[in-house]
């Protein structure tokens, strides 16, 4: 394995171009700390693929790290699909360099005798997932850093089922990438193997979205909606889908309808953060909207704000949005007598357990996977005799049906609008319905607390925190005794009441979950896409009546606050 000095020296010579060599020299002369950060490791695939800051070096996104990954993918595809016509769909978002990176991918694939289907402009990630299957591709690539800040970009690989790669393909592709030397990357394209694709796949996708999320075929629906793409790829698709489904009372956040990788109206284009939806909320107040919605730049995450009966607006968490949508869909299936024991819904181990309780209520199987939507997609692939209804994860991701195999904010936007419109006809709001669900199956409240630890030192700090919890786990959380520990790295579940161990049948992952006697849960994991360690807190209680919501909600908030206080001391 090369050390940092060897890597730096390599990047200052052929086959690297003059521009790259000069940038490395500039870092060497002016910013040795940044030079070390750029070369101390190689970018790796996490839960969302390869993602990093753009710049020169092995730990940065650039034409060579993108090129090496694509050459490794091409080698694996040619070995896997021998003597076949191989096709790969390629999409990209609005970020700086995304189009150029996508074109580099297409060039390299074509040079390796693989047909590249390259979109004619930026496209949402769920559309790429759909296109892989619709166009009978062997794989797909999307260039995006999702909701990360502007300096980031990313590279995600999809397999022929439309899902992000999982075992064994992820490991095999990584192995092929590791064998590629930079001078082996074939940058010289074969023009006849690159096909530009476009509107035909957009239209087919819109049809599928409406087919699976439009339950009321009226052409003029009363719901007043504010929408923002936060400068991202859903700028055309969501208005088109909503309009085609009869939602014509749509108000656009004009400042954020400008596609731009600078994301100049926000600090971070992440709908999980209230600040990213600030302009949408302001417009909602101005026009008296029923809901406001916003997506991240590649349109796989959806943030939602709803109007309360008081006239104020309430931002839903990802867990709350998923709760409402799961309940809505399962109720539709039940009302239409479509539930017969051969369906399932999917969730993850850091998503609210309220989803599991809803599955019990409707007597539908609920499968639980690791963090990352690729595991929900794998559930679909692994259970061909069961019909997938929907699935979600706490990080604002949701999927309706299986025509897409990744989280899909486009179809979810329509589904939420349909639900909100029906509730409005009943003179209810989504927030009122959420309270009713809490009364029916239990009041669960969650929060996510993260510690950012950047750079090489940050990785070491995160590992130290994980090891500390793994080797010396707490005896109680907020006064409630620990009863169970799940260690996904060691594939071990420890029952502290019976003092017994059992095996966890999950893929190995650096995740720890602690459960207490009162039903509280704390899950800890390093982020797969950001320099963070994440703490998922879940508490629950019984809600006797919707009139007791505020009082009970405050008690759960205080409980979460106490738990978070102990974590901020790390």
Image (spheres, rainbow, N blue to C red):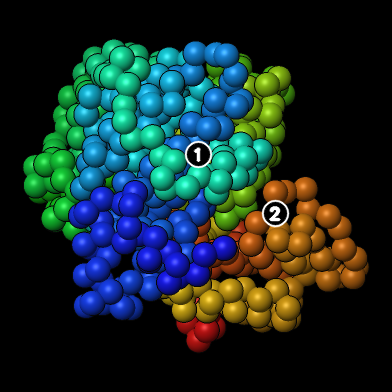
> Residue 557 bears which disc, if any?
none
Q: Position of residue 518 (x, y in %)?
A: 69, 68
In this rendering, position of residue 365 left or right of residue 77 = right
- Res 253 → quadrant: top left
> Dot 1 surroundings within 10 Å: few (below 14), some, or many (20 or more)?
many
Nearer the observer, 469 or 386: 469
How far apart are labels 2 and 1 at the CA level? 24 Å
Which residue is identified by label 2?
A: 508
Nearer the observer, 91 or 37: 37
Q: What quarter of the picture does the N terminus occupy? A: bottom right
Q: Secondary structure at mark 2?
A: loop
Looking at the image, which residue is at 58% across and 74% down?
A: 463
Q: Position of residue 551 (x, y in %)?
A: 46, 68
Looking at the image, which residue is at 77% across and 57% down?
A: 491
In this rendering, position of residue 476 left or right of residue 58 = right
Q: Secondary structure at mark 1?
A: helix
Nearer the observer, 9 or 48: 9
Q: Eyeballing the image, is 269 above or below 378?
A: below
Q: Is residue 99 visible?
A: yes
Of label 2 and label 1, which has the lower sequence position?
1
Which residue is identified by label 1?
A: 72
Looking at the image, which residue is at 21% across and 48% down?
A: 96
Callout 2–callout 1 Cβ contact below 8 Å: no
Q: Eyeballing the image, is 351 above or below 344?
A: below
Q: Position of residue 526 (x, y in %)?
A: 54, 65
Q: Is residue 152 visible?
A: no
Look at discs 2 and 1 and give the one toward the viewer. Answer: 1
Q: Eyeballing the image, is 392 above or below 453?
A: above
- Res 536 → quadrant: bottom right
- Res 31 → quadrant: bottom left
Looking at the image, which residue is at 43% across and 15% down?
A: 135
């Amino acid at each position: 394995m090369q050390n940092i000095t060897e890597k730096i020296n390599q990047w200052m010579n052929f086959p690297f171009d003059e521009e790259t060599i000069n940038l490395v020299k500039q870092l060497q002369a002016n910013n040795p700390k940044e030079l070390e950060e750029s070369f101390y490791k190689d970018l790796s695939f996490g839960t969302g693929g390869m993602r990093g800051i753009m710049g020169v070096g092995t730990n940065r996104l650039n034409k060579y790290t993108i090129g090496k990954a694509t050459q490794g993918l091409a080698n694996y595809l040619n070995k896997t699909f021998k003597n076949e016509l191989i096709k790969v769909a390629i999409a990209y978002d609005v970020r700086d360099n995304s189009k150029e990176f996508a074109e580099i991918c297409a060039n390299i694939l074509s040079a390796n005798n693989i047909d590249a289907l390259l979109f004619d402009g930026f496209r949402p990630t769920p559309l790429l997932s759909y296109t892989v299957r619709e166009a009978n591709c062997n794989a797909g690539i999307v260039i995006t850093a999702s909701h990360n800040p502007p300096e980031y970009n990313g590279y995600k690989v999809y397999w022929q089922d439309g899902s992000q790669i999982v075992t064994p393909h992820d490991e095999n592709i990584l192995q092929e990438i590791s064998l590629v030397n930079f001078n082996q990357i074939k940058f010289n394209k074969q023009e006849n193997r690159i096909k530009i694709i476009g509107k035909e796949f957009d239209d087919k996708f819109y049809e599928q979205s409406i087919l699976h999320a439009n339950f009321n075929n009226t052409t003029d629906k009363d719901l007043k909606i504010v929408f923002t793409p936060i400068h991202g790829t859903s700028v055309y698709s969501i208005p088109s889908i909503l309009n085609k489904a009869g939602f014509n009372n749509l108000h656009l956040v004009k400042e954020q309808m400008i596609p731009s990788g600078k994301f100049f109206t926000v600090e971070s284009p992440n709908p999980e953060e209230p600040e990213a939806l600030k302009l949408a909320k302001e417009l909602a107040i101005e026009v008296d909207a029923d809901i406001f919605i916003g997506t991240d730049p590649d349109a796989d995450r959806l943030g939602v704000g709803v109007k309360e009966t008081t006239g104020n607006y309430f931002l839903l968490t990802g867990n709350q949005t998923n709760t409402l949508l799961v309940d809505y869909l399962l109720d539709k299936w039940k009302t239409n007598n479509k539930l017969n024991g051969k369906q399932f819904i999917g969730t993850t181990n850091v998503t609210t357990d309220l989803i599991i309780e809803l599955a019990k209520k409707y007597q539908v199987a609920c499968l639980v996977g690791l963090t990352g939507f690729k595991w929900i997609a794998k559930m679909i692939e692994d259970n061909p005799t069961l019909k997938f209804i929907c699935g979600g994860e706490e990080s604002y991701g949701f999927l309706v049906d299986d025509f897409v195999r990744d989280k899909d904010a486009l179809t979810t936007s329509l589904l939420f609008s349909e639900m909100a419109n029906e509730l409005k006809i009943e003179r209810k709001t989504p927030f009122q319905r959420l309270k009713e669900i809490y009364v029916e199956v239990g009041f669960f409240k969650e929060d996510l607390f993260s510690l950012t630890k950047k750079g090489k030192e940050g990785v070491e700090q995160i590992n130290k925190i994980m090891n500390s919890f793994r080797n010396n786990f707490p005896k109680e959380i907020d006064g409630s005794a620990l009863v169970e520990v799940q260690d996904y790295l060691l594939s071990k579940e420890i029952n502290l009441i019976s003092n017994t161990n059992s095996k966890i049948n999950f893929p190995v992952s650096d995740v720890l979950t602690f459960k207490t006697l009162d039903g509280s849960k704390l899950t800890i994991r390093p982020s797969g896409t950001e320099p963070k360690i994440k703490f998922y807190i879940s508490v629950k209680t019984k809600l006797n009546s919707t009139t007791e919501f505020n009082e009970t909600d405050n008690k759960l908030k205080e409980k979460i606050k106490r738990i978070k206080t102990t974590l901020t001391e790390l």
